[in-house]
Amino acid sequence: MNKFQILVVEDDPPIRNLIATTLKTHEYKYLLAKNGEEAILQASSYNPDVVFLDLGLPDIDGVEIIKKIREWSNMPIIVISARSEDEDKIEALDAGADDYLTKPFSVEELLARLRVMQRRIALLKSDSDINEKSVYTNGKLRIDYAAGCAYKADEELKLTPIEYKLLCLLAQNTGKVLTHKYITQKIWGSAWDSNVASLRVFMATLRKKLEDEKASVSYIQTHVGIGYRMLKVDVKE
Ligand code: CA
């Protein structure tokens, strides 16, 4: 089974089914959304590897969806547009889309675009794997992944296993906003409301241990109603 998960956003049932069947045949995992609202919900809940996004949707304009997703994620977005939507296509690329497919397209073309994205992601991932093996540093924070320890200015932080997991997850995604749902999925394997409530508690204790009250610097930024982000901190602090 291909480990990639693809979100398909398309309001036209025959095209949606065509893409779904193609992905299924090639053993990709996929999620389907038939409008913009579903698209944003699925994107934030599951953090898919790639999004195929139809621009002409009944509720929210595709370009607006790209802008929304870009507020917190760099997930690759491949726009699907009809030829009559050429101007929208340019707008979509400017808004942060990575590639586009023009309708009508062949399934071979769709798969080829997907493989390009996969190669790009694989390259990025091999970079982050190398980082994961070594040591993460950010300001006075240092995480020794091999030892499973985190330090602040060379003093070991006494973290619970969940706090440590949270810290690593945020560190590995420094600069990116991770949604509550994404974090709870990664930490607990599910995104129940009770987990989101626990997340707030763990995040509060983690921040207390990590962030000096005296220092003006904060490592973790809260995005109210969305999630959290690890900031790149200036070494001097
Ligand atoms: Ca459409």
Image: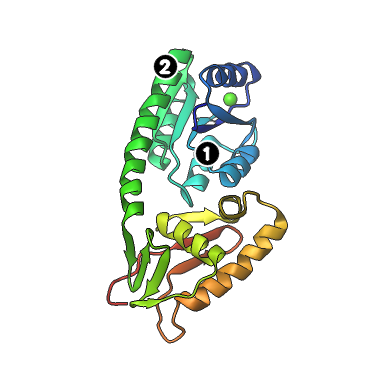
**Residue 43 in the image, given as x and y percentages of width and height:** 56, 42
**Residue 182 in the image, given as x and y percentages of width and height:** 57, 50
Checking the image for residue 158, the label placed there is none
Q: For residue 17, which quarter of the picture? A: top right
Q: Nearer the viewer, residue 60 or 24?
A: 24
State the separation of the CA atoms marked 1 and 2. Answer: 20 Å
Instruction: Look at 63% across and 21% down and name the residue there.
Output: 12
Instruction: Look at 63% across and 70% down and name the residue there.
Output: 201
> Alpha-carbon neighbours of circle 1 within 10 Å: few (<14), some, or many (≥20)?
some
Q: Nearer the viewer, residue 43 or 134?
A: 134
At label 2, which amino acid type do we have?
Glu
Q: Is residue 12 visible?
A: yes
Side of 20 where 211 appears, left or right: left
Hey, which residue is sitting farthest bottom in the picture? 214
Q: Quadrant of the C terminus?
A: bottom left
Q: For residue 202, which quarter of the picture? A: bottom right
SS class of the residue under badge 1?
loop
SS class of the residue under badge 2?
helix
Q: For residue 187, which quarter of the picture? A: bottom right
**Residue 23 in the image, given as x and y percentages of width and height:** 53, 21
Q: Which residue is mark 2?
A: 109
Instruction: Look at 39% across and 20% down and name the residue there.
Output: 112
Report ligand 1 position as a quadrant. top right
Q: Is residue 105 visible?
A: no
**Residue 115 in the image: above or below residue 130:** above
Q: How many numbered circles are shown?
A: 2
At label 1, which amino acid type do we have?
Pro
Q: Which residue is mark 1?
A: 48
Whether residues under marks 1 and 2 lie with C-beta atoms below 8 angstroms apart, the answer is no
